[in-house]
Image (cartoon, grey):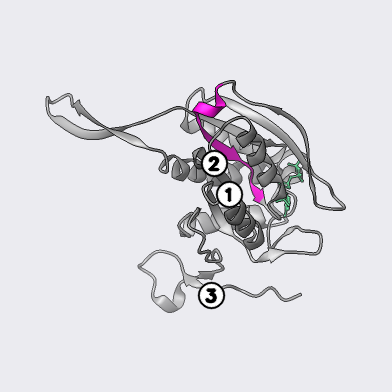
């Protein structure tokens, strides 16, 4: 099957003449207000190229996906509220800055979502992390909930929900249902995701318009097995076992 390329954008340093700049497939545009797609920079596209490549070995897959996860966490933190804070610098001058407001926690959708925990820990020291074990049925693609363990005060925290793949959206929607059943307001949930399908993003926006999604890339669609295309295959297998 011929993969259709989205309108290409010129990437790369400015010193090259336009006709020599490489072009690449960038994220599909989405209009849902709750979806933020990371800037499609040459760095991000190069990192995604590494992890999408079927010949990339497990060590490189872990390293490069972790770099993208860091970008996702940094962007997601920008969506949290801040308070003004003026401090004094060592030369005795005031600086009008800000400080973070409120408490956060991570919640990973196991197994693949656990791969994003390291990036969260690197940015937010000693962050609390809850777990929700949801597995997608290989035949029906329907999610099944097995287990959850969340911080006792999760309802008072901003929740960074972690899962690298948003395909049909079934697993992530189920995880949001679990969080809401524990009292987490919809607008206190940020879903951090590496690659989304347009269908998954639309499902989410329709059911939970107040949950914010921060994703690195919205792909072309789903195949007959509900895998994201072009995608990167099974994230959990590539990160943990292959
Ligand atoms: C994958 C992925 C998501 C889900 C996405 O997990 O990590 O949780 O599928 O598909 P959906 O949007 O159609 O629900 P999977 O259930 O394969 O388990 P894993 O994390 O153990 O790989
Ligand atoms: N889960 C994955 O790991 N990849 C997909 O493309 C879809 C679900």
**Crowd class of label 1 (few under 14; some 14 to 19; many from 20; radius 10 Å):** some
The residue segment tinted magenta is 153-165
Give how far across and how far down residue 128 sits, in percent.
Answer: 55, 24
The residue at which mark 3 appears reads as 7
**Residue at x 45% of width, y 41% of height:** 74
Which residue is labeled 1 in the image? 208
Q: Looking at the image, is mark 3 or mark 2 nearer the viewer?
A: 2
Q: Helix or strand or loop: what does disc 3 sit on?
A: loop
The residue depicted at 65 percent of the width and 59 percent of the height is 197
Q: As displayed, is residue 172 above or below residue 200?
A: above
Residue 233, quarter of the rendered image: bottom right
Tag count: 3
Nearer mark to the viewer, of 3 and 1: 1
Q: Which residue is mark 2?
A: 186
Quote the CA–CA distance across marks 1 and 2. 7 Å
Q: Please state the horizontal and vertical placement of residue 99, each as a whole percent of the image.
A: 32, 31
Q: Residue at x 59, y 39 (%)?
A: 161
- C-alpha separation, residue under disc 3 versus residue under disc 2: 34 Å
Q: Is residue 2 above or below residue 114?
A: below
Q: Looking at the image, tell me whether mark 1 or mark 2 is earlier in sequence order.
A: 2
Q: Is residue 196 magenta?
A: no
Q: Residues within 10 Å of mark 3 (few under 14, many from 20)?
A: few
First of labels 3, 2 by sequence position: 3
Say few, some or many: other residues with alpha carbon within 10 Å of mark 2 (under 14 / 14 to 19 / 20 or more). some
Quarter of the rendering containing residue 27? bottom right
Badge 2 residue CB within 8 Å of ligand 1: no
Q: Left or right: where does residue 61 sit relative to residue 101?
A: right
Residue at disc 1, secondary structure: loop
Could you say which is closer to the camera, residue 139 or residue 240?
139
Query: In the rendered structure, are the residues bearing label 1 and label 2 in contact, judged by CB atoms less than 8 Å apart?
Result: yes
Q: Would residue 235 be found to the left or right of residue 82 on screen?
A: right
């Amino acid at each position: 099957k011929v993969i259709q390329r989205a309108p290409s954008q010129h990437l790369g340093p400015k010193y090259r003449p336009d006709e020599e700049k490489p072009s690449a497939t960038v994220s599909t545009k989405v209009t849902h207000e709750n979806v933020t797609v990371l800037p499609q920079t040459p760095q991000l596209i190069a990192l995604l190229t590494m992890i999408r490549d079927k010949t990339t070995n497990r060590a490189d897959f872990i390293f490069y996906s972790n770099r993208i996860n860091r970008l996702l966490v940094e962007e997601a933190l920008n969506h949290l509220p801040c308070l003004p804070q003026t401090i004094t610098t060592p030369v005795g001058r005031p600086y009008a800055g800000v400080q973070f407001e409120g408490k956060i926690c991570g919640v990973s959708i196991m197994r693949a979502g656990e791969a994003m925990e390291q990036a969260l820990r690197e940015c937010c020291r000693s962050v609390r992390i809850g777990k929700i074990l949801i597995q997608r049925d290989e035949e029906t693609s329907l999610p099944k909930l097995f287990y959850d363990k969340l911080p006792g005060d999760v309802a008072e925290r901003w929740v960074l929900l972690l899962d690298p793949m948003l395909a049909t959206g079934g697993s992530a929607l189920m995880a949001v249902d679990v969080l809401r059943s524990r009292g987490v307001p919809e607008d206190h949930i940020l879903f951090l995701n590496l690659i989304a399908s347009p269908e998954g993003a639309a499902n989410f926006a329709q059911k939970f318009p107040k949950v914010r999604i921060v994703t690195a890339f919205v792909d072309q669609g789903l195949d007959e097995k509900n895998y994201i295309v072009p995608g990167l295959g099974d994230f959990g297998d590539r990160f943990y076992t292959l």
